[in-house]
Amino acid sequence: MSARQHLDQLWSRGRAFLGTELAIMGGAMTWVSDRHLVAAISNAGGFGVIASGSMSPDLLRQEIQATAALTAKPFGVNLITLHPQLDDLIQVCLDEGVGHIVLAGGLPPGTAIRMAKDGGARVMCFAPALVIAKRLIRAGADAIVIEGSEAGGHIGPVSTSVLAQEILPEIRDVPVFVAGGIGRGEAIVSYLEMGAAGVQLGTRFVCATECRAHPNFKQAFIRAGARDAIASVALDSRFPVIPVRALQNEGTKRFMEKQREVIAKFDAGDLDQKEAQLEIEHYWAGALRRAVIEGDVENGSLMAGQSVGMVTREQPVADILADLLMQAEAAVAGRGAAA
Ligand SMILES: Cc1cc2nc3c(=O)[nH]c(=O)nc-3n(C[C@H](O)[C@H](O)[C@H](O)COP(=O)(O)O)c2cc1C
């Protein structure tokens, strides 16, 4: 059996679930994963996912239609469960015949999972722990994504390698996709061997030629090493901050100062708890757009995973996937599994 045949066996469940040649998902990235990147990933054999972020239902409909005009291959849509119009967004996906809906950003309501499934879509949910994965499967999730703290963007506290060990041996009923910190094909093979159906990569696709991100944003990724992608921290447990992994810049430094200022105002009685919490949360409003679209890499949010160190140049999506495939095949061949 050739290395490719062996690899195809390893990720056959993921390929069948996604309807793709490769069980590699391009993780949805707000402002980054638009029609161009998504279609390029799907056209090259992977599975592109539109990031709907805070889009309105009308905007999402336009984006889905524009993506479908660029690719005949399957792609998915990532919806943020906290969006006030979640049901309308699901309806748009169903109207437009989107096959896979990824529910992200908090635990999805059971009603949303059922609505998407009843409309004929497959539902993928993020599980930050084994008990939650089991609960989501009982609620109808067709596949699970586990994303470790190496990932870019909003993260949980547990690393990908530990989540994989906790969850992959236990969850057999539905395919599980592993995300966070994957930059090379060897790592893909190791998660597949542990029982993953496929993988999801975000950071590695940011410097794709087809990606709309501003040249300054891409340049920051190309320059950065793994240790530059730092998780934000809350200064005071009274004012929690959802950790976000991003490249350090002026904005991340000022965020610490901002927290200090707000906490001082709270302690002095100038702000109440709610006002102080909101002021901290609002600090990053619009910051990802500022960096990705406007190219303000000093003050904007440079969300990036630790795998950013493996991003060394701008490359077409097809070349990124070809590199990953080559490394994966070499890993399989190196194990002597392929005769
Ligand atoms: C700039 C950026 C924006 C992201 N936005 C989202 C998002 O809107 N929704 C989501 O579910 N995940 C989001 N993510 C996470 C990715 O979909 C993906 O799971 C993650 O990047 C995988 O880890 P990696 O960065 O180590 O490859 C984002 C990641 C980055 C780097």
Image (cartoon, helix red, strand yellow):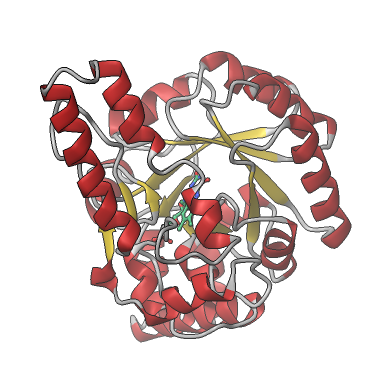
Q: Position of residue 68 (x, y in %)?
A: 84, 52
Say if residue 337 shows up in the picture: no
- Between 311 and 124, the one lying in front of the other is 311
Residue beneath the point at 70% across and 28% down: 89
Q: Position of residue 14 (x, y in %)?
A: 56, 53
Q: Is residue 332 above or below residue 34?
A: below
Say if residue 144 shows up in the picture: yes
Q: Is residue 120 above or below residue 111?
A: below
Residue beneath the point at 24% across and 20% down: 271
Q: Position of residue 278 (x, y in %)?
A: 35, 26
Residue 116 lies in quadrant: top right
- Between 60 and 156, the one lying in front of the other is 60
Residue 118 lies in quadrant: top right
Left-right relation of 88 to 254:
right
Residue beneath the point at 65% across and 22% down: 85
- Between 19 and 92, the one lying in front of the other is 92
